[in-house]
Image (cartoon, rainbow, N blue to C red):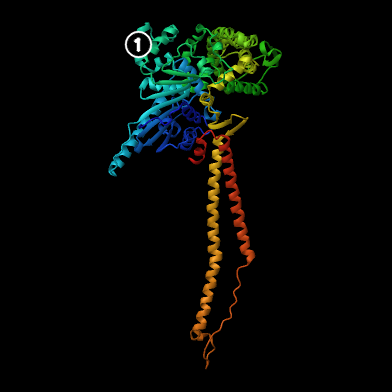
Amino acid sequence: MKNEEILNTDILRARIAEVEYGKSGKITVEQIRKIIIEESGQAPSGEITVYRSADIKEISNLKISNKDSGFDGTVIHFYDPRKGINQSYTITRGSEGSEDNGEGDPLDWIYNGLGIFEGKIKNQYEHASRFDTIVTLKINEKIKEDIRTRNENGEQNKPSELKKIGIGHSLGGNLIQMLQLMSGSFVKVHAINDAPPSAYQLALVDIRFKRKLSKEFGINPSKDDQLYSIPPAELKKFTEEYYKEKGKNIHHLTAEEDMLFAARNIRGFLDLGTRNVIDTDPGFDGIKHVVDRISDKDLQVQVFLAPYAPAYQQNGLEGLIRAMTGYDKELLTLIDTIEQEWDQLKDGPDWRAITVKVPVGGPIAGINMEFPVFAIPEMPTELLMALNEFAKRLAEISVKLRALAEQLPTLLNIVGDLLPVLGEKIMSYVKEIQGHLNNILESIGEVAGLIAEDILSFDKPDYARYLVGLLKTAAVIKVETANIREKINKILESPLEIWEDIQKAVHAHGVSTVATALALEQNKSRRYEGGDMILMHSGEKIEVNLSSSVRVYQIGMDKYEQKADLLDRIKEAYYRDYIDDFQDRKQRLINEVHYMESNPHAFSYLLPTGNVEMRGISVHEQIRPLESSFMDTFEDMFNYYDKEREEGVELLRKMRSAIEQLFDEDKNISAIFDLR
């Protein structure tokens, strides 16, 4: 049948999706062909074209407020008009730990929270939609031009209409489903261990749905507290019914132990289309029992988080932290500036009175700071500006930390829900973090009135009076933020059994784990790792990386073929420039001798003048052959490299033969070595 899916198995789709996470971040035509050959034993026909979001300027330059959304994707187009093949696979990449190969911000995971769970940002969805639209136009234009050329050449075979298929893993699974629910342009969507769409996310993207939601539940969805107050079960039922038709061609492939599958019952998440659940670890039941402990009431923390989405869209991760806490790198720089200016001032010549040591209490008890008894004649401009800016920042921090502190009981509730699996130690760390935040707030509270009165209102403030408070607060902020980081690290480093379960759930989330489980279900003794197929011998504990072996074989055979070609050219040059040239020069010399002996009169000019006649010439020639040592050197070299090449080729053939014999039940292996 024409235009049947090229990537027609779950394993193929999972393996292709995994390549998206490669170190290079690029799917190549060679990789696609290799995977198809490994799984089917046949090379794909026709032309394969790869479109990457990073290579398309309309996408790579697409930013919101000069910030990268974190979206990455690829479209693979298979085209063979003679066989009626014309199909594209839009692959949206899943969540990465961080952008730029681990060097950048964790944009994907922030989008998971603010975009999917909260439904407050949509930049990755918008960029995915734009990417799919642009590439679809490019493909259709290319096909149109190809048809025109074929018609001019008198060819009658025309390709089928473009068949679009979507593939996505994790966050990519969410994005590809969102594209289908909004456009319906894919004949099929394959979501692998996906982050499901949420009703809140769709309410942000789909205006018509938002109106239906408002009418059904009598709320204003633009008001977060009303939208999040809809009973989750009712919201889920209504939303799934609304998108049922568009979602019917969505097919989920899910590991039972996957961490996202464990969270499927969290408020707002949807379940559309069909689902194939596979067991990737028979000895592990997943972490659903952990997630289910968290109450829905505590998950309404959405109301608190929602207003911070604009700050993230405007200024990225740093903007998000600043919006939630008032704290950023600039604050530390400001504190360092104040401390440096203070040190220069107190050690300078402008003091007109002795200084006194003032003990500082609180978290930095035991530290003495020196302050003047009398006022300073003139405050340095740099210090004055820094103090004013710091005062404003303290007011901002106070407001935001108080709002954050109000949410800490919810966090404590969540920890309390998870107490059987987290333990009392984690609870104590969280409470200590709460204490550190309160210390910062208390310190700000002590100096807040003083700042407002002395810095912002009076023309001639008492510098010694408020400097004590400001410097003490700066010290408290530095110490307590360091304490908070320490407690967070202790939580992450705690030797809890739940961490092991979480690691297993994370492992089950990977597409290679899914592909391996599928192979085992089909009684194929193989697993997948880093895009490679690894064969496992059933009778012995032997594993063979077939992908790597084929690469070694094919590259090795190519190299030896190149070596043979080079050696042939060297031999040709040797015989041409030495052996043949010597024979040519020898023959030319003999011919000259014969000519001289046959035509002596022609050489009379060689005789002295006078009555002399040239009657004959007799040449006794003796031409020595080429030195045997010279020729032997070359022949030995040629024999050495010929033998080395033959031994190398034979070694590669033995390696191939050994693998074929070891896994003789798999008839595709021999073809895999030969196909490219």
Q: Is residue 353 above or below residue 580?
A: above
> In the structure shown, which secondary structural element does the residue marked by tag 1 occupy?
helix
Q: Is residue 421 above or below residue 40?
A: above
Residue nearest the observer in this picture, 23 or 194: 194
| Image side of residue 51 versus residue 451, left or right | left
Residue lying furthest bottom: 611
Question: Which quadrant: the N terminus?
Answer: top left
Q: Position of residue 232 (x, y in %)?
A: 45, 8
| Image side of residue 513 versus residue 478, left or right | left
Residue nearest the observer in this picture, 671 or 105: 671
Q: Position of residue 27 (x, y in %)?
A: 48, 33
Residue nearest the observer in this picture, 109 or 35: 35
Quickly name the residue at label 1.
Answer: 212
Q: Amino acid at mark 1?
A: Lys
Q: Position of residue 282 (x, y in %)?
A: 57, 18
Q: Position of residue 297 (x, y in %)?
A: 50, 6
Could one spot residue 5 in this view of the protein? yes
Could one spot residue 442 in this view of the protein? no
Q: Residue at position x 64%, y 8% from top? A: 424
| Image side of residue 105 versus residue 149, left or right | right
Residue nearest the observer in this picture, 132 or 45: 45
Q: Residue at position x 34%, y 35% from top? A: 84
